Amino acid sequence: MFSLEDAEARARQIKVIIFDVDGVLTDGQLTFIPKLDGTAAETKGFSAHDGLGITLARLGGLRVGIITKRESQTVAIRARDLKLEFVYQGQHHKLAAAKAICAEAGITMEQLCYVGDDIVDLPVMRICGLAIATANARPQMLAMAHWTTPNRGGHGAGRDAIEFVLAAQGSLDRVIEQYLDADDPAVLASDIGNGTQ
């Protein structure tokens, strides 16, 4: 088990935060709506709390992205709405994507936070600077995570992770107040889309 002090010290080094999608930014349920041609449309539910959290992350100087095993048009649409900088879908072996993100961002693995819930996330979580498990994560994830979110995936776990990092870095209160300033141009530049893009 890791202490809260250790997790906070790790969080102070973070420059990029990466999320798994299913079970982290969603509740993990996959819903398929059949079409007449025999195919199906996939739908997922995302938390608005996580979306606003991503804006706060950007205001706090963090870069944000996703790595997911599945490929989904729904995820592509949500990633575009969230203006995510790093989007890696169809990644069965997520460590390669995490290393590519570090190279692109010009950071070390110690400066990467990864938020996951299942064993496919273990290779990244074992070597990243801050490994966060969601409250609904599998036991193997909970056992090795530096910190666990109070909320389940799809119910604000992403926001929990972001706020934990920002609080450890001493910027959470500042970015909340900055977000509330209607005249701050950085807020508009950092804010997520409105669902119409």
Image (cartoon, rainbow, N blue to C red):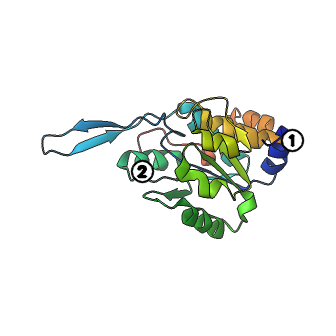
Q: Amino acid at mark 2?
A: Ala
- Residue 24 in sight in this render: yes
Callout 2: helix, strand or loop?
helix
Disc number at residue 46?
none
- Nearest to the observer: residue 97 or residue 137: 137
Callout 1: helix, strand or loop?
helix
Q: Are marks 2 and 1 in contact (CB under 8 Å)?
A: no
- Nearest to the observer: residue 12 or residue 77: 12
- Give coordinates of residue 96: x percent, y percent: 56, 66
- Nearest to the observer: residue 185 or residue 109: 109
Q: Quadrant of the N terminus?
A: top right
Disc number at residue 76?
2
Q: Tell me the crowding category of disc 2: few under 14, some 14 to 19, or many 20 or more residues within 10 angstroms, Cα based.
A: some
User: Is residue 105 shown above or below 159?
Assistant: below
The span from disc 2 to disc 1 (Cα, nearest Å) is: 36 Å
- Nearest to the observer: residue 38 or residue 186: 38
User: Is residue 24 shown above or below 98?
Assistant: above
Q: Tell me the crowding category of disc 1: few under 14, some 14 to 19, or many 20 or more residues within 10 angstroms, Cα based.
A: few
Image point (62%, 69%), residue name: 104
Q: Quadrant of residue 69?
A: bottom left
Q: Quadrant of the C terminus?
A: top left
User: Which sits earlier in the primary sequence, circle 2 or circle 1?
Assistant: 1
Q: Amino acid at mark 1?
A: Glu
Side (left or right) of 129 relative to 52:
right
Give the mark count. Answer: 2
- Give coordinates of residue 80: x percent, y percent: 47, 50
Disc number at residue 5?
1
Image point (48%, 38%), residue name: 194
Image point (50%, 42%), residue name: 193
Q: Quadrant of residue 185?
A: top right
- Give coordinates of residue 18: x percent, y percent: 61, 52
- Give coordinates of residue 53: x percent, y percent: 63, 38
